[in-house]
Amino acid sequence: KSLLGGTCDWNIDCENKGSICLRGRCRCHPHYAEIVDEKRVPAKVGQICTTKCREPLFCRSGQCQCVQRGTTTLINGQCVSMSRVGDRCTRHYDCSAPFSACLNSQCVCISGTIQQGSQCIAKPACPLGGIPGNACIRKANQHMVENFVDDADDCPLGQICITIGESPMGHCCPKVCPLGTLPELNYSCDPTASTRCPSDTHFCHRVSDGGFSQSLCCRRPCNAMAPKALYINGTCMARGQLNSQCTANEQCGGGETMICNRGQCECLAGFHPLVDPVTHPLRNPSQTCTRDCESETLSRDTTCLKPVALEAHCRCQCKCGFKKEKQRCVELPPSPKTTRQPSVMVPGTVIVPGGDFLSLIGNFFGGTEARSATGK
């Protein structure tokens, strides 16, 4: 297999975790970043040397040799120095006992653990609350992150196997919803399931422990206005949009782009009403705001993005004339009318009759051909 920068044909040809095959080379996945691990690897016995070898080897007769004494031992042809709790050390990776670290040149147990002899014991815990259960084994594939299949682990019904890092071993913890209520195990968050989680009274909550995640069907706190309701400081409030009535900033898009001013949602300073091919000042006015950006940048959500070169990291967006639908960009249906609409002036925006300005923007960023793209 190839390391980063090496040649490849498929993703499986790349050695490093988080790397993919892109244009014939192994590169980091967009959700990963390349880092340099400066930790020294264990020295190999028999390597040619002149005067010195990598610790804990020493050079004798032109070859690196290992002296097995004290904490130094030979494992698979490599000379490894294994320091237990209480032994002297110079670096963290000198301490071989689980949950130990090098502090003041001595291997000690890290905070939150208890020392028992030469070991550091960590008490099992459930991140979402509850009492830890028996040991378990994760049997599901790492790539199955949307919804778990049956028998994904060997925990009893209503519990999930919480693992440590990439290890398949862990302990069972109860499935808990954000507000402490028990999940509805009879419903599924799988969009293809026959008994889907009812959106009018429930919502799907994602539970994740790193490499795996699972969606739970949880009860909504607000039924009267569901699903267009917000639970704010123990009170159910209607979800607001641009120019709608409000009593709290959180109603206005979570307070990220809008603010509740004099009982009405309006754009924050530095933001303006979002206008795209779907919105119309009269028939379909804008419901949200977008950030003001300089002419050479693009406004997306609450940030300004700069154009990037080929092969650079980017964020996939649907081009003009397309809309997002089930993680894909689907072409919008043609307009039923071709008559020119009168120009309307909206504060902060200028609409040119006939949509010529929007067409110009669409051609500038997306070209003249209409083609769909799969979102990442």
Image (tube, rainbow, N blue to C red):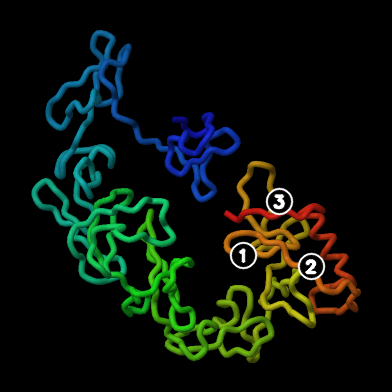
Q: Which residue is mark 1?
A: 325
Q: Which residue is mark 2?
A: 334
Q: Earlier in the sequence, mark 1 or mark 2?
A: 1
Callout 2: SS: loop
Q: Amino acid at mark 1?
A: Glu
Tell me residue 293's x, y (percent).
72, 63
Q: Earlier in the sequence, mark 1 or mark 3?
A: 3
- Tell which residue pokes out farthest to the left in this image: 117
| Quarter of the view holding residue 153 | bottom left
Task: Please name whichever residue, 305 or 158, is drawn nearer the observer in this view of the structure.
Answer: 158
- Callout 1–callout 2 Cβ contact below 8 Å: no
Q: Which residue is mark 3?
A: 307
- Callout 1–callout 3 Cβ contact below 8 Å: no
Tell me residue 197's x, y (percent).
43, 75
Task: Please name whichever residue, 232 or 197, is drawn nearer the observer in this view of the structure.
Answer: 197
State whether residue 152 appears in this view: yes
Query: Of circles 1 and 3, which is in front?
Result: 1
Tell me residue 331's x, y (percent).
71, 62
Q: Residues within 10 Å of mark 2 (few under 14, many from 20)?
A: few
